[in-house]
Every structure is written in C-alpha cells, then in structure tokens.
Image: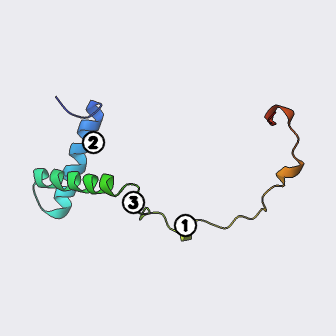
Amino acid sequence: MPKQASLAAYYREHREAFALALELGCTPAEAKQKLRDQARARRRACGTRAPEACTDSDFEPMDQAPGDFRAWDCRHMMRD
C-alpha cells in the first residue's frame, strides 16, 4: 500500500524518480533516495532561511502609489 494520499501521487513520485535517474545515470531506487534526502533537507531548513528561488529581481516596481485609507469610511468595518 503506498504512503501517498492518492494513486496519482504514488505514480507522480515514481515518474520524478525515474526522470532524475535518467538525468543522473543511476538507478531509480538511488534517485528516489536522493529525492527523499532533498525533501528532508527542505523540511529541516523550513523557517530557518530565506527561500532560494525567490529573488527581488523577479518583481517589478509598483506604478501606483498606495491608497489613502484615512479617508475610508465604512461603518460595518469600524471597531466599537
């Protein structure tokens, strides 16, 4: 019985391992272990460092200035 939530996740994991095995020139079992090690390292690093994929150069500067919310009058959103 697979540990994944669905049969699709089970086959997706095997496809990723096989594709990595073809790329690295190793067996699918070794590639699966490498994927597990990478996932374990990501979980261990979660919350301890900034994401590597996200950089400031990916975002464009905003063209509009932020709105002035001091003049915003909505009684249903006001606190007592």
**Residue 26's spot in the image, x, y percent?**
11, 59
Write down the residue under mark 3.
48
Question: Which one is in front in this view, the residue at disc 2 or the one at disc 1?
Answer: 1
Q: Rate crowding at label 1 as few (under 14), some (14 to 19) or many (20 or more) other CA atoms within 10 Å.
A: few
Circles 3 and 1: CB distance less than 8 Å? no
Which residue appears at 43% of the width and 61% of the height? 51
* Mark carried by residue 13: none
* Foreground pick, 54 / 20: 54
Q: Amino acid at mark 1?
A: Asp
Which residue appears at 22% of the width and 53% of the height? 35
Which residue appears at 48% of the width and 63% of the height? 54
Q: State left or right for residue 2 relative to residue 43.
A: left
Where, quadrant-wise, is the C terminus in this rendering?
top right
**Residue 53's spot in the image, x, y percent?**
43, 63
Q: Amino acid at mark 3?
A: Thr
Name the secondary structure under disc 3.
loop
**Residue 63's spot in the image, x, y percent?**
75, 65
Give the spatial CA distance, label 3 vs label 1.
22 Å
Q: Rate crowding at label 2 as few (under 14), some (14 to 19) or many (20 or more) other CA atoms within 10 Å.
A: few
Give the quarter of the image for residue 66: bottom right
Q: Amino acid at mark 2?
A: Arg
Vertically, is 26 above or below 14? below
* Foreground pick, 23 / 33: 33
Write down the residue under mark 2.
12
Write down the residue under mark 1.
58
Mark 3 vs mark 1: which is more N-terminal?
Answer: 3
